[in-house]
Image (cartoon, helix red, strand yellow):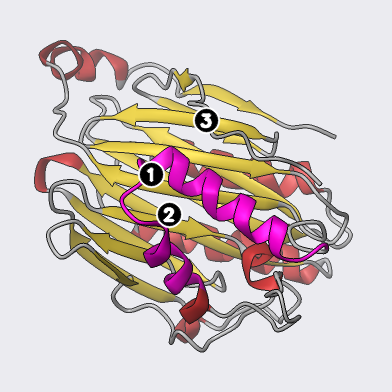
Amino acid sequence: MTTFDASPPPVDRLRCMEVWGGNSPGEHELSRPGLDLWLSARASGPEGGGLHFVSSCASGRITRFLLADLVPGRGAFVDIAAKFRELLKKHVNRIQQGGCESGMRRVLEDSADQGGCGAVMMATYFAPNRRLTVCNAGHPPPLLYRAALREWSLFPASASADTKTTVDEPLLESGEYQRGSLQLGPDDRVLFYGESLLECRTSDGMPLSVAELLNRLRGLGPLDPQRQVAKLLADLEREHEDNLKQMDTTVILCKHAARRSTLRDNLLAPLRLMLPVGDKTRFSS
């Protein structure tokens, strides 16, 4: 049994005009204007590839991230991942994520044509107005913590708490893409996670539902974000011997932070627009 480390992970450096991520396992912390992110990625089994990317615009005010569970079919996993990476590069400075969503759909359609399938979650955070916009294509619904209410709930416009999706389902139709947008308040948190958590079993062998996952989060109490992720995963793994072993596990917890884009980054933004987007992605075999 793997023990999840609750010690603070190193803070990864994400510069303006860069894309970071890949499929390598590990614990990471990223600090961006208006947002802190904690990411836990773990490679487990052959039934799907976990993928995560985070991008930052020329001034740092736009943070976009993508979380995917992929079964690539005849196409290579790295090839599909590269398409998502290039998509984030292309739209790195666009506040609205509509163009990125259209590109995401085309990547999924291309994968489906080759016998693949997948589930993707994309989110964009614009620091000046503290707005987080989410597009969910087959992933379990993200979960929202309102600090002022001290309460976890479903992210607005998400699927029902009784809904259970799987990465083996056919490609979603356009009407089945779920979207939501809201303004984050001080210390609010949003948890994004893959299908592996809903493949877990409770101690009596029953499948874990989204509603039950919400209850687990509520029961953890006021932990700091990194410990919250580590404790949730460790508790699930201890509960049943098969938990978190069949699929890659990727979890992203983002938290509102009272941090603005620096004057230096704002002044340098026009110059950075003339440069290529940096690439800090890496893939393990």
In which image quadrant can residue 218 be found?
Answer: bottom left
Cβ atoms under marks 1 and 2 closer than 8 Å: yes
Was residue 168 drawn as part of the magenta stretch in this picture? Answer: no
From the viewer's side, name the closer residue of 243 and 48.
Answer: 243
Identify the element where label 1 is drawn.
strand
Point out which mark residue 100 bears: 2
C-alpha separation, residue under disc 1 versus residue under disc 2: 10 Å
Q: Is residue 139 above or below residue 67?
A: below
Q: Label 2 amino acid? A: Cys
Q: Is residue 27 above or below residue 99?
A: above
Q: Nearer the viewer, mark 1 or mark 3?
A: 3
Query: With 53 as the anchor, is 115 left or right in this view?
Result: right
In which image quadrant can residue 151 be found?
Answer: bottom left
Q: Position of residue 138 (x, y in %)?
A: 57, 74
Q: Label 3 amino acid? A: His
> Magenta residues, as a range?
213-241
Find disc 1 in the rendering and name its residue: 64
Which mark sits nearer the N-terminus, 1 or 3?
3
